[in-house]
Amino acid sequence: MNHMGRGQQPIDVVIVGGGPAGLSAALSLARSRRRVIVVDAGRPRNMTASHMHGVLGHDGLSPLRLLELGRKEVAGYGGRLIHGEVTSARTDGAAIEVDTAIGTIRTRRLLVATGLDDDLPNIPGLRQQWGRGVVVCPYCDGWEHRDDVIGVVATSPHSIEQAQLLRQWSDRIIYFANALGVPATDEMDALVRRGIAFEPSLVTGLRIDDDRVTGVEVDGRVVPVGVIFTGPTPRPRDALLRSLGAATTNGPFGSWVDIDADGRTSVPGVWAVGNVVNVRANVSVSLGLGSLVAGALNAELVSDDIAQTRATPSLSV
Ligand SMILES: Cc1cc2nc3c(=O)[nH]c(=O)nc-3n(C[C@H](O)[C@H](O)[C@H](O)COP(=O)(O)OP(=O)(O)OC[C@H]3O[C@@H](n4cnc5c(N)ncnc54)[C@H](O)[C@@H]3O)c2cc1C
């Protein structure tokens, strides 16, 4: 089945991924009277968190409720929403075909907003507490744990910075070195100067009571904590972009798909936004970038529309 837009016109933009970035772009595009379809698998990165923080006007709202509101707004302007996972698409240079649960959709542009996966440290109990008793972002959850005993379970050299950052929210920080061992002398000095406790041993598990993290197991002991911050390895969900041949660059977090300042990938007609191409995009940034990319995408479509109008013989009136 090949899906076209209203009046058999092709769809303007298919957006793969209906998180904050994809839905924000969809809202702007639908309000620009573009024919937009969002295909979403329904697994946003922060789905295990019951509350979302630092999002102006929505502080404390559930992340899933934000998306529910966003979907309603997009649909209200004529945007179409399809549930399902997109695993294949192709481009012939002129248009793009996207395979979805309801058939193949032909579109002028493809915007990929599929987010990223957090590769968590392999510690028993940690995954079950992800987004609740185990979190990543001080700006999202630091305030809620101010003055608490905060355990930082190290996963990389950046974990030292995470511990130092969290000292802003509490003076009871414990840095669990886990497999990373003793840090460099200057880093260790800085931990001591800031009153950050140091646990050198391997972390073997978490202590959970009544579904709450209460401690970290090391050396057969339980060190009491109120919450754990850790730094998962970010894995962009970029298989679709890579399958289309999008160029990538190696950085501190591995190989990521390149975009220009507007969100264009190296593949003509294929754009990307949000965590799939930007590890630092929190909800507010994803919403903002979705809007920014939608503006640039719409402008490019307008340029195409102008070029196509020129090709049509002018009518005398
Ligand atoms: C535990 C936790 C708590 C957080 N709390 C906060 C917070 O309080 N405040 C804050 O600002 N930020 C927070 N964040 C960060 C926030 O989750 C991200 O900034 C945000 O989700 C990025 O939005 P996105 O649209 O790029 O990706 P996502 O929200 O991950 O959305 C991507 C969507 O694309 C879908 N998708 C993926 N692949 C496909 C495919 N092939 N086909 C179809 N659909 C697909 C996914 O199912 C998902 O619905 C938190 C993150 C975590 C891990």
Image (cartoon, rainbow, N blue to C red):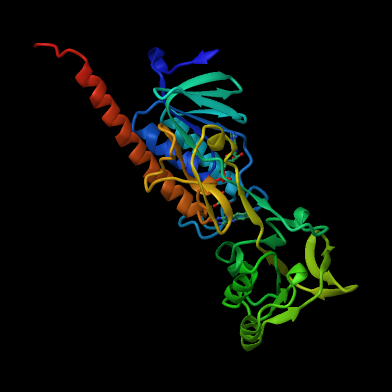
Relative to residue 158, is residue 211 drawn left or right? right
Instruction: Check the image and name the residue furthest to the left.
Output: 317
Where's residue 17, x and y in %?
Answer: 54, 37
Relative to residue 164, is residue 76 drawn left or right? left
Where does the C terminus fall, quadrant-wise? Answer: top left
Q: Is residue 10 above or below residue 297?
A: above
Residue 17 visible in this rendered orientation of the protein: no
Q: Residue at x 83, y 63 (%)?
A: 208
Where's residue 21, x and y in %?
Answer: 48, 44
Q: Residue at x 50, y 20 (%)?
A: 105
Quarter of image, res 147: bottom right
Q: Residue at x 37, y 48 (%)?
A: 261
Where's residue 211, x and y in %?
Answer: 80, 59
Where does the N terminus fall, quadrant-wise? Answer: top right
Q: Is residue 126 above or below residue 286?
A: below
Q: Nearer the viewer, residue 243 or 46?
A: 243
Instruction: Check the image and name the residue furthest to the right.
Output: 220
Q: Residue at x 72, y 62 (%)?
A: 133
Q: Nearer the viewer, residue 67 or 104?
A: 104
Residue 70 visible in this rendered orientation of the protein: yes
Where's residue 53, x and y in %?
Answer: 55, 59
Relative to residue 205, is residue 272 drawn left or right? left
Q: Nearer the viewer, residue 51 or 313?
A: 313
Quarter of image, res 76: top left
Q: Is residue 192 above or below residue 107?
A: below
